[in-house]
Image (cartoon, rainbow, N blue to C red):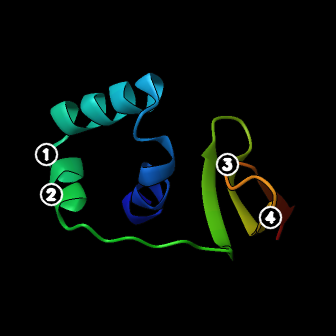
Amino acid sequence: MVAQFRATHDMWADDPAFTTLLDRLTQGSSEFRRWWRANEVRTTASGRKSLDHPRKGALQFEYTSFQANDDPALKLVIYTPI
């Protein structure tokens, strides 16, 4: 996830909200600092996600994401329950 977060860094590096979030993550987590310093960049167009819902329990989803050609800041992600 940090590698995917880093993939959006250049696009949002001047956004105060992004900078604040990055600062909070860096200051609050030694794991995040280690992963951030790894400088890994990755975009993932599809895959699987597991979520632990407080009432429903473990949920599994397949997802696919689509990047808008006209606006690189716009992305559509579709989650389908497995």
Q: CA distance from mark 1 to mark 3?
A: 29 Å
Tell me the crowding category of disc 3: few under 14, some 14 to 19, or many 20 or more residues within 10 angstroms, Cα based.
few
Q: Quadrant of residue 65?
A: bottom right
**Which residue is disc 2 drawn over?**
34
Label 2 sits on a secondary structure element that is helix
Label 3 sits on a secondary structure element that is loop
Label 1 sits on a secondary structure element that is helix
**Which residue is disc 1 drawn over?**
30
Give the mark nearest the N terminus, 1 or 3: 1
Q: Determine whether label 2 and label 1 are within 8 Å by CB.
A: yes
Quick check: 19 above or below 73?
above
Q: CA distance from mark 1 to mark 4?
A: 36 Å
**Which residue is disc 3 drawn over?**
73
Quick check: 74 above or below 69?
above
Give the residue type that dot 4 points to.
Answer: Asn
Q: Quadrant of the C terminus?
A: bottom right
Give the mark nearest the N terminus, 4 or 2: 2
- Marks 2 and 3: which is nearer the front? 3
Tell me the crowding category of disc 2: few under 14, some 14 to 19, or many 20 or more residues within 10 angstroms, Cα based.
few
Quick check: 54 above or below 50?
above
Residue 29, position in %: x, y?
A: 20, 40
Q: From the viewer's perspective, is 19 left or right of 69?
A: left
Q: CA distance from mark 4 to mark 2?
A: 33 Å
Nearer the observer, 11 or 33: 11
- Marks 1 and 3: which is nearer the front? 3
Give the residue type that dot 3 points to.
Answer: Ala
Label 4 sits on a secondary structure element that is loop
Residue 59, position in %: x, y?
A: 71, 57
Give the mark nearest the N terminus, 1 or 4: 1
